Amino acid sequence: SQQGEEDPQALSIQEGENATMNCSYKTSINNLQWYRQNSGRGLVHLILIRSNEREKHSGRLRVTLDTSKKSSSLLITASRAADTASYFCATLGMKTSYDKVIFGPGTSLSVIP
Amino acid sequence: EAGVAQSPRYKIIEKRQSVAFWCNPISGHATLYWYQQILGQGPKLLIQFQNNGVVDDSQLPKDRFSAERLKGVDSTLKIQPAKLEDSAVYLCASSRRPGQASYGYTFGSGTRLTVV
């Protein structure tokens, strides 16, 4: 079974609005990562937050992590049409011998110009 | 630095045929991953290499899928024979070392396989 589950599955907003996507996971993690995937392309790493961090910013992106609730959120502020893509959260497990990153099913974001 | 290179970009085959995908990771990245992404789903890890050794292949359908990473650099993923349900995008990713995955993976553009 997949570790991460994004919510909502699909999101449609107007350009300039903020977009919030949530991710829940089941077991303890080393870190949580967010990726973007444009249609027909590979995944692009956006931001990583470690288990001992609560909030992280990168440009228009803000990620929060609540390990007590096993959840994370990705906020994209002042959205642009170019932000239209699928967004995936991925969790890195706690094994020390090797890492294993597991992806959720993704949130499809549409930003309407 | 150059990205992760994958080829071919697209492939259409008939069921029961065989197909191979190629991946060249970022130079110096010891860890290489193959993911399968079915339309509308998140990527699923098929196999993970550390240098030229297999670290995790628990979700690789070994009766039909095989992968190798010769000399710890390039990797090939093969399907033989293909089934309709193998239609997906096959993504290759790399990272420096297991611990360095803390900085995220770099993905290639993927190979879109259609089995008819």
Image (cartoon, rainbow, N blue to C red):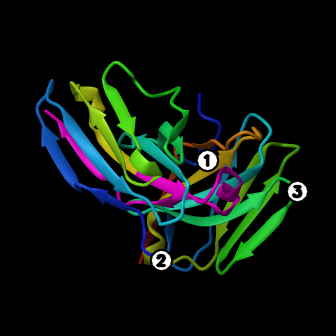
Q: Chain of mark 3?
A: A
In the picture of the structure, the residue carrying the numbered disc 2 is B1
Amino acid on which the number 1 mark rests in the picture: Asp
Residue A108, image x, y percentages? 47, 55
Q: Is residue A23 visible?
A: yes
Horizontal side, residue A102 vs residue A70: left or right: left
Q: Is residue A39 visible?
A: no
Span highlighted in magenta in the image? B92-116
User: Circle 1 sits in a helix, a strand or a loop, which is it?
Assistant: strand
Residue at 47% across / 54% down in the picture? B93
Please identify the quadrant where the C terminus of chain B is shown: top left
N-terminal label among 1 and 3: 1
Q: Chain of mark 2?
A: B
Residue B105 falls inside the magenta stretch: yes
Amino acid on which the number 2 mark rests in the picture: Glu
Residue at 64% across / 78% down in the picture? A60
Residue A25 falls inside the magenta stretch: no
Neighbourhood count class around disc 3 (C-alpha, 10 Å): few under 14, some 14–19, many 20 upward: few
User: Circle 2 sits in a helix, a strand or a loop, which is it?
Assistant: loop
In the picture of the structure, the residue carrying the numbered disc 3 is A52
In the picture of the structure, the residue carrying the numbered disc 1 is A7
Residue B34, image x, y percentages? 44, 44
Neighbourhood count class around disc 2 (C-alpha, 10 Å): few under 14, some 14–19, many 20 upward: few
Residue at 67% across / 62% down in the picture? A74
Residue B63, image x, y percentages? 34, 18
Residue A31, image x, y percentages? 75, 52
Q: CA distance from mark 2 to mark 1?
A: 34 Å
